[in-house]
Each structure stands twice: as C-alpha cells, then as structure tokens.
Image: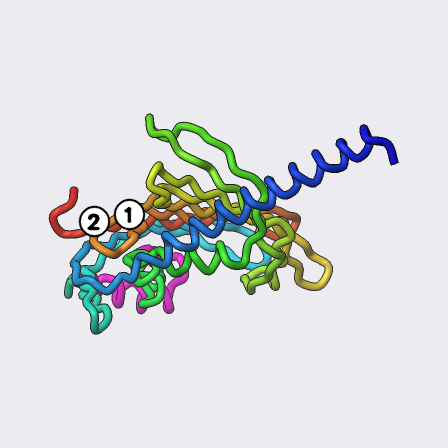
Amino acid sequence: MTRALLRSLAIIICLDMAATSLEADAVTELRTILARFRGTESMKATVEITRSRHSKGRFQNDEFEGSASAEVEASPEGMRAAYSRSLLSRAADEGAAHQFDSRRRDGTFNAMAEMLPETLSSLIDAAPSLLKLVERSRFIEQHNGVDHGRKVRFLTLDLPPSGSGSEAGEIAFHEDHLTVSVGADGVPLNAERIRKGSAGLLFIHVDTVRTQVWSFAVRGDHLLASRFEDFSVVSGPGQRGEARSVWTVRPDGMP
C-alpha cells in the first residue's frame, strides 16, 4: 500500500470521525438542554385553539370552523384547566343540534374535542414531547442560518416510518422529517415536522401530508409551545380535504 493511499485513507477516517462527533455533539446538546426543562414551576396561561376542517368524499364529509379557550394552571402537583360556562353551553348545544341535523355547524364542539389534557400539557410543557421525537430520530445534518434576524443552527432529523388511524383507514407514513432551530444558547426556537404517507380502505387509496410547526418560548422551567399549527391535507379518488388546528399559549404577564 503506497503512502499516498495510506494518507487518503487516514483523511477519510478523520473526516468520518469528525462527522460522527458533530452528530453526537449536536444531538447530545439538544437532549441535555431539553431535559433541563422540568416544567414543575407554577404558572398560569390562556390556551386558545382555532380548528377547521373542509373535506368531501366517500370516507368523510365535514365542513366546520370553530374556536375555544381554557385557563390552564400548572403547579408541582399537576395541571388544571378551566372553561367558561358560556363556552361549555355553546359546545353542548352545537353537539346536540348536530346529532339531529348534520348540516348544523358544530365548530365550537369540535374545537373543544381537541382540548384534551395530554394536548394542553404538551403545549405548557413542550420539552418532553420534543425530547421523545429527538430520541427516536436519526441525525441528518446541521447548518447555520438566520431566523427573524437571529443567528440560529438548524438540525435536520429523520424519524422512522409510523402509522396511525384515520377516517380513510390506516395511514402509513413513509417519510417523517423533523427540523429544529436552536439559538446561541442551544434552546429550541422553532421546530417543523413534515410527514408524508398514504391511507387505504379496500381498493381506494389517498395520499396525505401532515405538517406541524412549533414556536417555543421559555417561562421559568417551562418550554412553552407559544404557537403550534397542525395542518393536514388528504387527496385521492376517494377523499379530498384539509384540516387545520392552530394553538396559542399566552402565560399571565406575557403579551
């Protein structure tokens, strides 16, 4: 083996080791920082959702838009959510009316149906759910950039294929990518997850794309999802439509 060949092999090995080290450092740093957000300090926040669905096909026909809100209080003991009496009454009236006439609008009822305890918790304390995604992912690359005038690092991660149920049958996601932007202190600023897949029932198949976008903020030891948008599009011979949920979290004392 010539010296030139040995030198080339040494360079390749060094570059590979450097890339592996870069990957380990980036992912390890993100995991470490996310683990610091315990989410145990007391805080109060207003959580709002606007939800819409416009779909037509043989699996589902829906047309609604609605909103709802809750006053959420987190403490070392747990989490409480309070809803106004008028909101609860409106949601109940819409749900009852829709049972007798499917043409009646039930946007508030559908928005309230999304305000599950685990969803509210994941908004008030976004770090644990983001950490679980990072732990399941495979590092792809990182690069520097600018986000709203701030210098940030973008980490691109790949998640394994997964599946979930829907009105159109079982959805198989064959592409699942997560991009996290972090600031100079390593704290996540934003994240975007894009999943592409297909669903099938008998001989009918549809394609779907689900995009989730988070904007984060720090309040005490909480990493808040100050804004979270979940947008899905379904297209195919048996079904066409889109669904969107937009969440906002406003802690007391913050605009």
Q: Residue furthest top?
A: 149
Relative to 189, is 77 above or below? below
In the picture, residue 168 is in which quadrant? bottom right
Residue drawn at point x = 59 percent, y = 48 percent = 196
Q: Which residue is mark 2?
A: 250
Place residue 213 in its image quadrant: top left
User: What amino acid type is highlighted by mark number 2?
Assistant: Arg
244 up-or-down from 183: above or below: below
Residue lying at the far front in this picture: please name it. Answer: 3
Tag 1 secondary structure: strand
Percent across and percent down for residue 82 are: 18, 66
> What amino acid type is highlighted by mark number 1?
Ser
Tag 1 residue: 226
Which quadrant of the figure has residue 7?
top right
Front residue (pair 190, 242): 190
In magenta, the rendered stretch is 87-107
